[in-house]
Amino acid sequence: LRTGITSVEFVKNDGSLRTMKATLDYTYIPPITTPVVEAKEQKPVKENNEVCKVWDTEAEAWRSFRYDRIKRISLELG
């Protein structure tokens, strides 16, 4: 995920199958365009090691999936 775009097929919470073009490669992720929130206004983010947060290149937004629901992963080399 950190180099290039990976196709991830997984089962969504509603039971349907979803395929997502995902990446953690910042050459594909646009710079942050939302305003910065003051530290005192931020809510603490609870880390969940069962979930992978990725950039969906087709939806152009952050999405996540659960590791235990992955059905297939494929990537292109070179």
Image: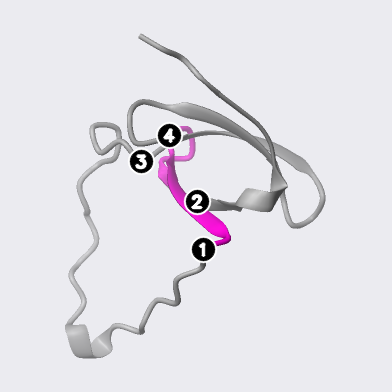
- Disc 4 marks which residue? 57
User: Observer-nearest residue: 71 or 32?
Assistant: 71
Using the numbered discs, state the Cα–Cα distance from disc 1 to disc 3 in whole angstroms.
Answer: 16 Å
Q: Which label number is shown at residue 63?
A: 2
Q: Which label number is shown at residue 24?
A: 3
Residue at point 79%, 44% (across, down): 16
Amino acid marked by disc 3: Leu
Q: Is residue 44 left or right of residue 67?
A: left
Q: Are marks 1 and 3 in contact (CB under 8 Å)?
A: no
- Asked whether residue 52 is drawn in magenta, I would say yes
Q: Is residue 24 left or right of residue 51?
A: left
Does label 4 or label 3 sit earlier along the sequence? 3
In the depicted structure, whether residue 38 falls above or below residue 9: below
- Asked whether residue 2 is drawn in magenta, I would say no
The nearer-to-camera label among 1 and 2 is 1
Q: Are marks 1 and 4 in contact (CB under 8 Å)?
A: no
Amino acid marked by disc 4: Thr
Does label 1 or label 2 sit earlier along the sequence? 1
